Image: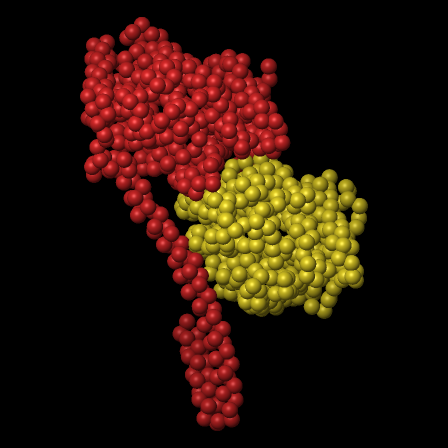
Amino acid sequence: MTAATTLPQFPWLSLLIGLPLAGALLCLLHRRSRQECRWLALATTLATLAICIGLFVACRHGDGPWLLREDAAWIPRFGIRYTLGLDGLSLLLTLLTAGLHVVAVLLAWPEQRRLPQFLALLLVLESGLMGVFLAVDLVLFYLFWEVMLLPMLFLIGIWGGENRRRAAVRFFLYTLAGSLAMLVAMIALYLLHGAQSGSYSFALADLLQTRLPLTQEYLLFGGFMLAFAIKAPLVPFHTWQPDALSEAPANGAVDVTGLLLKTGIYGMIRFAFPLFPNATRDALPLLAALALVGLFHAAWSAYRQDDVKRILAYSSISHLGLVLLGLAAWNTTAWQGSVLLMVTHGIVTGALFAVVAMLRSRTGTRNLNELGGLWGAAPQLSACFLFFALASLGLPGLANFAGEILVLLGTFRSQPLWALLALPGLVFTAAYLLRLVQGTLWGPAPAARAAIPDLTVREWLVLLPLIVLTVWLGLAPAPLLAPLAAVGGLP
Amino acid sequence: MNQTLLFLIPLLPLACAVANMLFGMRLPRLFAETLAVCGVAASFLLTVLFWSYADGDGTRAVLGTWLAAGEATIPFALQFDALSAPMTLMVTGVATLIHLYAVGYMHEEEDYARFFGLLNLFVFAMLAIVLADNLLVLFLGWEGVGLCSYGLIGFWYQKTGNARAGTKAFLVTRVGDVFLAAALLWLFALTGTLSIGAINAQAAGFAPAVLTGLTVLLLLGACGKSAQLPLMTWLADAMAGPTPVSALIHAATMVTAGVYLLCRLFPLVSLSPAGMAAIAVVGAVTALYAATCALAQREIKRVLAYSTMSQVGYMFLAVGAGSVAGAMAHLLTHAFFKAALFMAAGCIIHLAGDENDILRMGGLARRGPRQLFLVFLAGALCLAGAPLTGGFFSKDAILLAAYTQGTPLFLLLWGAGLLTALLTALYTFRLVYLVFAGEPRGYSHLHDLPQLMRWPLWPLALLGLLGGLLNLPALVGGGEWLRHRLGALAGREIAATHGTEWALAGLATGLVLLGWGAARWRYARFRGEWDNPGSRFLLHGWGADAAVDLLVVRPFTAIAGLCALGIDRALVDATLDGLARQTTACGERLRRLTSGHVSTYLAGFIWGFLIILGWFLLALVR
C-alpha cells in the first residue's frame, strides 16, 4: 500500500511550510489583540502538528525512498526546481519541529513585550525549519537555511537576556560564515555537475550522480560540512551556542533553538554524506575524533558552569557528540540510534529548558549558587526537573537511553575503540547533571526567597505531553524507528 | 496459567510506586502506606504462587519488544528459574518486612509519598535485575536501583551533606556501570544478542583472552554496586539515608546485585581462571579491608556498613572459588541477619534520641526493651559466625571452597578469610558490648518504639539464625537443599574429607571465641576508646576518600576548569576576537593600500607575480 492511496491528493508538504507562515502574517495583522494572537498562534502550531501526525500515521509504511514528493518548475533557466520530499528522517524531524513549536507557543503565553511580533517570528522560524527538513533542491534548501537564520537572530537580539547583542552578533557571524562556505561549495558542485553531464541542475537527485576527483570532493565536502558543523555545533565551532542558548528568550524561543542544532546533523545526513561518499568515508575517523572531543570537552565545560542554561547548552553539545559518533560508526543500528537520540534529545532538552524558564520566572535567577532547596517549595516543578534531568543522563526506560544504547551497540560492532572511548561519558553526564540537580533542588532554600507557586495548569499542559513522550520513546521507540529503514543513501 | 503473569511480580511494585508518586500526597496517609506495603507483599505472594514455574530449566516470559534497530532486537523478557526464584523470594520477603518497619519508622515524616514511592520503585528495579532475561533489562534495573539509592540516601535533602552522599553513591557506582556497559557492548558484538541464556551457552566458544577481559569488566561492574575495592568509598557515606533504606538497599539487596550478576553469568565467568582468581582476590581483600575499618568506626550504622562490605567480599570470594551455591547461601542468610541488625540499629538510634555514636550509648541491655537486645544479639551472632547460626554455615562453606581450591593463591585468600572471620567476631562483639553493656553514657531517657518497628525484626532474626538449613552440609546430616535446587547453576562440586571439614569448622569456632574473648576483655567495661593515628587511619577507611579526592576529583575539576575557561574562553573565543580584530586591521591596511603611492602598487604587483610564479613551478614539478 503506497502513501498515495491512503492520503488524498494535496500539496501536504507545502502546507506544512505555508501554514505557519500564514499564521505569522495573521498574527502581525491582529497585533492589536494579544489574546487573539496567542490563540491564533496556538491554533496554527496545533494544526501543523496535526498534519504531521496525520502524515506519520498515513505514510510511515510507504515504500520507496520518498513517502511523499512535490515537484514544480521554479527557475528553469538555472535548473532550480521547487522540490519537496518526505522520507522517514524528515518525517521524524518535522514531527519534532511541530511538537516543540506547540510547546514554545504555550511557553510564550506570559511574554509581555511585543507578543504578536514574537509569535510571528516563532512561526516564521517553524516555516523555515519545515522547509529545511523538506527541501530536496539545493537552492531551495539554502533559501530555507537562511530564512531560519533571521527570525532566530531577531528573537535573540530583541527578546534575549543581558548579553543579547553579543550573542546575536556571534550567532549571526558564525552561521553566516558557514552558510557562505556552503553556498560556494553548492555552486561549484552545480557547475562541475553541469560540465560533466551537460544539464545544469540543483536537484539533489541529479547532483547525486556527479562523479568528482577526490581532491574536489574533499574541498566541496569541507564547504558543506563547515556549515553543518557550525550549526550542529561541533567543537571547535561551538562557542556561539552556549551564548545563543543562554541569551535566547526563556519564554519559548530557547527550546526551539535546540531545533536549529538538529538542522546541522540533518544536513550532514541528507546532503553532505550522500553527495560526497568518498570524502565521507575518509573523513569518518576525523568526525569520530571530533565527536569524542566534543562529547568530553562539553561535558567538562558544563561541569564548571554556574548558569543553569549554560549547563544545558553545553549538555546539548555533549549529547550531539554522541549523535555524531553514531553517524561516524556507519552502521544501521548506530545510525538509527543517532536519529532517535537526536529526536529524544530535542524533546528532553526542550523540556529541561522549559522547566528552567518556569524556574527562572519564579526565582528570578538562573545561577546555581543562588538556587537550592526547591523541592520543599515547589515539589511538582522539582519532580519534573528531576525527571527530565534523569532522562537526559540516560536513565534506562526513558527516552535518551534508547538512542544512546543503540548508538553504542552499533558503534562497538564496527569500531569497538570509539565506543569504549565514549563510555566514560556516562559518568561525565551524570556528574554535571547531578551537580545541576544538587544545586537547584537539594540543600537548604535561600533565606531571602519568597514563597514559590507550584506548576500552573498551562505549565502542566506543556510538560505532561513531554513526560508521556519521554516514557513512551524510552520503552517503545520501535514504531518511530520503523520508517527510517527505507531512508536512502546511508548504511 | 499464562506465564506472562510472571511480569506482575516486578510490575506491581512499579504500579504502586507510580501511584504513590503521582497521588500519594493527596491520599490519606494510611492509604499510601497500605498501597506501598501491599504492592510488595503481593509480589511476595505471587512468587510463592508461581514457585513451580522455576522447576527444571525455569520459565521465560516475553512482554514485547523494547528496542529494534538494524541487527539489534531486544525484548522485555524475564527468566524465572532456580537462581532467580529464591532471590526473588528473598527480595520481596525482606522488602515486605522492611516496608512494614518503615511505616513505623517514618510515621512522623511529612514527605511520605516520595519515600514510599522510591522504596517501591527500588523493589521494582531490584526485581528487574533478578528476573532479567537479557542484559539490557538487567541494566535497566541496575541503573534503576542506583537512582533509588541516590534519591533515598539524600532523602533528607535539606542537609546538603545528605544529598552529596547520594550524589557520591550515584557517581561511584556509575563508574562501575561503565565497565558493565562495556561488557554488555562487547558481548553484543560477539554474539549478536544480549540474552543471558544465549550468552552463557556461547561462552565456551570465546577465546581465553576475551573471556578474561569480559570477566574483569563484569567484575568491575559488580564492584561498583557491591561496594568492593576499589569502588567502595560510597557505602559508608550512604548511611546518611533513613535506616529502612540502609537495611533494604545497602545491606540486603542492592549491594548483593554484583554477586548476583556474577552468579547469573557464572557459566561465562568460570571459563576464565585468571578472571576467577581476580574475583576471589577482590573479594578477600575487600573483606579484610572492610573488617579492619569496621573495628574503629564510631557510628553504629557505619560499623554495619563496613561489615556489609566485608560480608559481600566473602560472597565474591565464594564466586571466585567456584561455589555459586556458597555465594548464594551467604547472600540469603546475610540478607536476613543484616536487615535485622540494621532495623535493630534503627530502633537503638531512635530509643537513644537520634544518637548515632556507640561511644555515647551503653546500658541498653538492661534499660532498653528485652526483645530488642535479643534480636540484635541474634543478628550479631550470625554476623560473627557463632556456631550453628546461619552465618556460621554459610561462611564456613565459603572458606571450605577457597581451601579446597588448593593453589597457593587460594590458600593465601583462605588465610585472609580466616583473619577476616577473627576480626568480624571482634568488631561485632565490640559493637554489642559498647551498645548494650555497662551504664548509659550519652542519652538521658529512652524514647518510645512504635509497634511496627518491633515485630518485623523477629522473622528476620529467626531466618538468620536458621539460615543454615538452606544449605546444610552433609557433614551434619543436611541435604544441601540450595545446591540441589540450583542444579547445574550451583557451580563447582566441593570435595573434602569429613576430617578436613571438621577441622575447618573447629578452626572457625575457635576464631569466633577468640574474637569474642578479646572484645569482652577490652569492651565489657567501658574504658574510653583508642584515639591514635592507627585508629584514625582505620576510622577514615584507610584514607580512601582523601585519595580519591586527590587522584580523581581534583584533576577532574581542574580539567573542567581548563575546558570551560581555558579552552573555550581563552583559546577559541580569543582566537575569534583576534580574527575579528585582524579583519578590522586588514581593512585598515587595505584602505592604506589605495593611498596612491606607486611604490605600494608596484610592491603588490611583484609579490603577486612571485606567488603565481611559485604556484606554477610547484604545479610543474608535480
Regarding residue B213, the answer to whether it shows in the image is no
Q: Which chain is red?
A: B
Q: For the point 80% across and 48% down, which residue is it?
A: A9
Residue at 58% from the left image edge and 43% from the top image edge: A378
In the figure, is residue A97 to the left or right of B49? right
Q: Residue at x 21, y 32 (%)?
A: B530
Q: Decide: is B103 above or below A355.
A: above
Where residue A374 sits in the image (x, y, percent)? 53, 44
Q: From the viewer's perspective, is B531 left or right of A423? A: left
Q: Classify residue A300 as left or right of residue A388.
A: left
* Residue B475 appearing in the image: yes
Report the residue at 47% width, 35% height from top.
B155
Q: Looking at the rendering, in which quadrant would you find the N terminus of chain A?
A: top right
The chain in yellow: A
x, y (%) of residue B39? 56, 22
Q: Nearer the viewer, residue B301 or B616?
A: B301
